[in-house]
Amino acid sequence: MVLSRVKPEIATRTSKNIIKSKCVDSSSSCSPGLSNSDYQFSSAELRACIYSMLWTGTDIFMAFLLGPILRNVSLSTRKEIVYWLMPKMVFYMPTVAAVTTTAGYFLASRLGLITLFSPYVYWLIAVLIIVIAMLVQGLGILLPTNLCVYFEAKES
């Protein structure tokens, strides 16, 4: 088994942390089945999780639910939906992306993952390259295209 190679105290502690977790706030009541343990979720971890779920959930909703629906409706209905949805999404998606990225950065710095030492510096460089490439694509290609589509739809 995999756990046989791990030290017994680490395996026990890890399994307890998976099964049991502490409440977010000591004044709030725990739900049934959860009890105190060694691990407590910090507000930074929860914020990063919630923001990333918002971002990912919106992407999944737009791609897998709204996309097929829009393909099957008439062109005039599609135009009305895009005209109504575009201003909201042009504001919402960059905001959620920026907040998620910021929360992830502060969480990583709080956990000590942003260092210039050997194993982490390569991951940090890779992440920065990906972030810069996505920023150039988002602000240089996608945002002007979305604004152009919105203004064209607004005119007609």
Image (tube, rainbow, N blue to C red):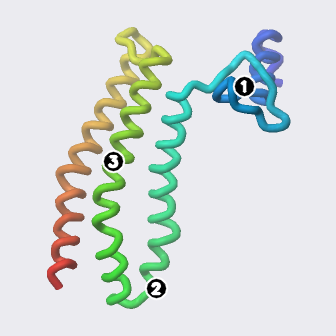
156 relative to 25, above or below: below
Three-letter residue code for mark 2 = Asn
State whether residue 142 is above or below residue 46: below
Residue 72's mark?
2
Residue 68, position as x, y percentages in the image: 48, 76
The residue shown at (21%, 78%) is 153
Find residue 82 and report its image quarter: bottom left
Extreme residue toward the front, this view: 27
Q: Which residue is drawn at 81% across and 26% down?
A: 35
Q: In this view, does 95 lie to the left or right of 11?
A: left
Does 20 appear above or below 50? above
Q: Mark 1 belongs to which amino acid?
A: Lys
- Indicate which disc, 1 or 3, sits on the residue closer to the N terminus: 1
Check disc 1: other Cα within 10 Å, few if <14, some if 14-19, many if 20+.
Answer: some
Element assignment for label 2: loop
135 lies left or right of 56: left
Q: Which of marks 3 and 2 is nearer the N terminus?
A: 2
Q: Can residue 75 be seen in this view?
A: yes
| Location of the N terminus (image quadrant) | top right
| Residue position marked by numbered label 1 in the rendering | 22
Local secondary structure at mark 3: helix
Q: Which disc, if any, is residue 95? A: 3
Mark 1 or mark 2, which is nearer to you? 1
Q: Where is residue 48 in the image (x, y as percent from the top left)?
A: 49, 35
Residue 142: numbered disc: none
Q: Quadrant of residue 134?
A: top left
